[in-house]
Structures are given as C-alpha cells and as structure tokens.
Amino acid sequence: MNQMTDEPLERLRAAARRTRELALNRAATGLGHEDADDDVGTIGTDDALGFDPFSLLEALHHNGVRAVVIGQVAGIMHGSTELTGDLDLLWDGTPAHAPALAAAFTSVNAQLADETGKPLATHQDSFLRPKVQFTSPGASGDCCTPALPWGNLQVREFLDRAITAVDPGGLEVHYVSREDLIQMRRAIGRPKDLRRADELDSFASNRRGDSPQR
C-alpha cells in the first residue's frame, strides 16, 4: 500500500534531528544497540550519536531493495513520540535479492556482524542468515528475515502488508503497518515494547473518539 505523502518521513527526519541534538554533548559509553536497556531503549546507547537513518534508507531505495522498516523507527513513522538510536529492517530472505542488499550496505560503508558480534564480510551470503547486525556512519541495527524465530508471528505476511511512504524527491521507504508493529511489540514483551504498543493502540482509540487505553 502506498502512502503518497511525506508526513511519515518528515516525522522521522524530525525525530532523528532531535536524537542527534539530545546526544550531541553526551560522552560515549561504549554501548551499542545490542546493549540497549529494556526500558530506555537505544536512545541511551552510542548508536544515538549522529543518528541519521536516511543514508541507508536512500541506498536501499536506489538499489531497488524492498526492505521493510520495523522497530521504533516504524513506530515514529506512525506517530510515536519516543526517540530511538537504531534502525531495524526486515526483508524476505530470497537469495536473488541479496546482491542488491549487499550493494546498498556496502555503499554506506556498513560493517556486519553475526548475533555473537563476530564480524562478517559485507557480502550477499552474509545476509542469508536469519539476522545480521550492522553498523554504519548514520545508523546501526538488525537486518532480519522471516527465518528468524518469530514465535507465532506470520512476519512474511507483514512484508506483504507493509506501507510505502514517498517523499517529494521520490524516495520510497517501506515500513510495517501499525497493527503488525503492535503484534511485534506485544510478542517481544519488554517494558519499552509494551509501552510503545500501548501508545500505538491509543492512536486508533483517538481516531475512534475513544479515550486512549493506557
């Protein structure tokens, strides 16, 4: 589904700018997104320093990659007010799509690692793992496939239902639907996930004229 408006991307631009401003004078801690607190999230890690996901999002677009934004960046695009310092992605894991994905990450000088933190080559074969961690000058996070254990979540269907935001310059960013993001949040169940799921739920309640459910 295409959402022919720049509003979700403007929300993300504004949030990334606030994140950079908030972290501007903060001393580095040595903590990455994988070390994030279950309540505060990655805004409290070094990944918030200089956070700008647009270089990678633009690289994905220019290389024709249909990677879907999940996590709190997707939440922000839906209107969440909580800031984040990482970018999480979901793609279909099809081997034929891996070369374009590798080209996009290579173009922004991204570095890859497996789930234990062991470095991986920025090569198409690395992306065929269920999940790889990445760091780049603008954003760090996880790049996942449906092969990752997702419990009862039918995440391949989430890819099919993803929304596409398009800015005036033609940049397309795919992001998970609000309903599917709520499912992901509640399935993970950390304090920050449950809080953010409640926030997303409140948007629907407000549209119906109900009081937010907190």
Image: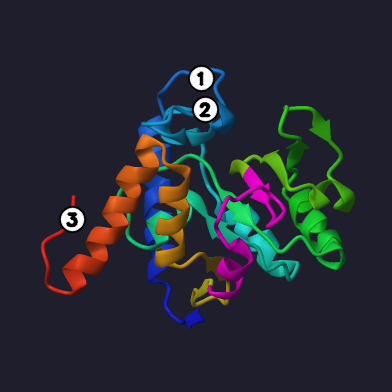
Answer few, some or many: residues within 10 Å of disc 3's Cα (few below 14, many 20 plus, some between 14 and 19): few
> Label 1 belongs to which residue?
28
In the rendered image, which residue does mark 3 sit on? Answer: 213
Look at the picture and state if 200 lies above or below 132.
Answer: below
For residue 73, which numbered disc appears in the image? none
Q: The residue tagged with tag 3: helix, strand or loop?
A: loop
User: Mark 3 or mark 1: which is in front?
Assistant: 3
* Residue drawn at point x = 80 percent, y = 65 percent: 94
In this rendering, does residue 72 appear at all?
Answer: no
Name which quarter of the figure residue 132 lies in.
top right
Ranked by sequence position, the earlier of labels 2 and 3 is 2
Report helix, strand or loop for mark 2.
helix
Q: Quadrant of residue 189?
A: top left
Can residue 152 be seen in this snapshot?
Answer: yes
Q: Is residue 126 magenta?
A: no
Name the front one of labels 2 and 3: 3
Question: In this picture, which residue range is highlighted in magenta?
Answer: 142-161
Q: Give the alpha-carbon distance from disc 3 to disc 1, as whole Å.
A: 37 Å
